[in-house]
Image (cartoon, grey):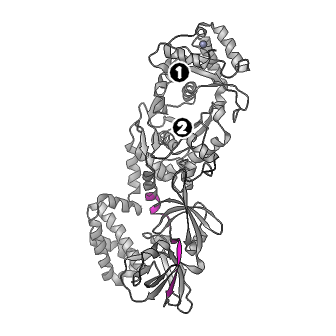
Amino acid sequence: MDGIERNKIEELAMKYAVQNAMKYGKAKIEPVMAKIMAELPEYRSQAHEIKKIVEQIVEEVNRMEKADLEDISSKFGVTVEKKKQEGERKWPELKNAEIGSVVTRVAPEPNGYPTLGHAKGLLVPFIYARIYKGKFLLRFEDTNPRVEKREFYDAIREEFKALLEGAERELGLSPGKWDEEIIESNYLPQMYSMAERLIEQEDAYVCTCDAKKVRRLRAEGVECEHRRNPKERNMELWKEMINGGIPEGGAHLRLKTDMNHPNRTMRDPGIFRIVEAEHPIQGRKYRVYPTYDFSISVMDSLTGVTHAFRSKEFEPHVEVQRTILEKLNLRKYEMIQFGRVTVEGVPLSKRYIRPLIESGILQGWDDPRIPTLRGLFRRGITPEAISRFFYDLGPSKVDSTISMDAIAAYNRKILDSVVPRYMFVPDPVRAVVENFPEGLKATVQVHPSRHDMGYREIKVPAKKGVAVLYIAGEDKKTLKEGDVIRLRGLSTAVVRSIMPDEISLKHISEKKESEKVIQWVPADQAVPVKVIKPLSSYSISLVGGFGEPAMKELRPGDMIHLIRYGFARVDSLDRTVNLIFSHE
Ligand SMILES: [Zn+2]
């Protein structure tokens, strides 16, 4: 039995032993043997040898912790089904929710590229909509034209789409997309007529105090003179706001509540203001825009939302929003707060990231150093990992600080069982192998525990018994004369001598045990590889080296694992394969 056959048997034995152990608590030799023999009848003549392998593996499996068992079994796809069902029951129930009638939404403002901080705000309402077999809306909250741009609408659509599709694949929540897209600014005429209704009802008035005075009077709980204006005068001023008779900052429409209210946000809050800026969709059609409190409460009601999720920081505003709904006699809905997410040591704010881009330190919003969703995707953090991570985090109201290491751990778990392995030698050093048999070739497994992913052959030409390879500079440093090493998948060799820029090896045919298995690349077919490693928001490191011949077949976007190095995503290909390092 050769090495490849042995690997194949070991892998099958592992799979069935784990399955057996998961089912009965302990694995047994006989059922595992029976399954292997049924699957590989051509090996019956070697049953004795196979049994030895099975005995070893069953013993190993029976020593494992439960968590390890689960880990391995999920690699083989044994418990994937079970995991999905468990998940759906784990999230707390929604108040006043019925299957089929829940409507949720995500309401991003198109004022920047979405970051990891937006993922919770997207996934929480999406997951609930799918658990309750309801409807999920994407609503662009675009009523602050000075900071909003077309490119941000598109970025949000693209990133959210990728994340939701990932959530469908990973969590089984289908369909992984929003059911309807709503542009809030298209509702401005309706919002204007609501404003006018409030003026008519004497529930709103136009105040022309400057911002400083408004702030002072609100703090003191004192009413301004405009509060007593008759509704006709208010309507006149409102029309002037709309028609351009009053400049920006000259007036705003305020809700009439109570200037002595203990919750200060309730002291006659502003509900419309003038913004003289071109709107990315509406152009110059409007100059009066609602405030956040007004638009969010009215829009959730108008678009049929039954459960509106909001970031906890807006909690003092809930009362204002409820008051607006009451005064307009609009349909009420559940308002649910959730905690914010910050990433340990990583700035999420545009205010921080923008200057880094403008100064050229970062290449753009998709720079793999920053936690924008496109930056993370470019780095090879999968939508599946992000959605599984936030699924496990749950919809909690508590603010949480997460670490990139935790996200990387989720990503590793998802990629580990599916991505192909390649040999890569960073900082390469020539290795000359003597006594090399003609025609010797390496057979490397595409994935160590998945023989279904196949094998690759690497031919290594030898001239007069000498083959030339590259090995990693780091590996060379650890070797000394006389060491026996295993060149992965190819040959066993003895270190003959070590020179500053070269190492001399000798192939030996007898099988000697060796602890050191190192990766290598044939010198005549070495593919240049560049790895960009993000270190912080400011820094990257660049590692050059050679990859095995098959790496030139890679395509941008491919995820790979570099043996003894880590996971990476193919960013681009020219004569060089350009990779971005994901994590170990
Ligand atoms: Zn006033």
* Location of residue 16 with respect to 290 vertically, above or below: below
Quarter of the image with the C terminus in it: bottom left
User: Does the magenta portion include 425?
Assistant: yes
52 relative to 507 in the view: left or right: left
- Quadrant in the rendering for residue 16: bottom left
Residue drawn where x is 73% and y is 20% of the image: 244
Residue drawn where x is 54% and y is 37% of the image: 106
Q: Nearer the viewer, residue 568 or 559?
A: 568
Quarter of the image with the N terminus in it: bottom left
Name the residue at the front extreme.
Answer: 500
- Tell me the SS state at disc 1: helix
On the image, the x and y values in percent for residue 212 come to 58, 19
- Tell me the SS state at disc 2: strand
- Residue 106 is labelled as 2
Q: Which residue is mark 1?
A: 325
Q: Nearer the viewer, residue 418 or 104?
A: 418
The mark tally for this picture is 2
Magenta stretch, residue numbers: 412-433
Q: Give yes or no for contact between labels 2 and 1 (Cβ–Cβ under 8 Å).
A: no
Quadrant field for ligand 1 = top right
Question: Crowding at label 2, few (<14), some or many (≥20) Cα neighbours within 10 Å?
Answer: many
On the image, the x and y values in percent for residue 518 come to 45, 75
Q: Nearer the viewer, residue 510 or 354?
A: 354
Three-letter amino acid code of the residue under disc 2: Val
Three-letter amino acid code of the residue under disc 1: Leu
Q: Nearer the viewer, residue 303 or 468?
A: 468
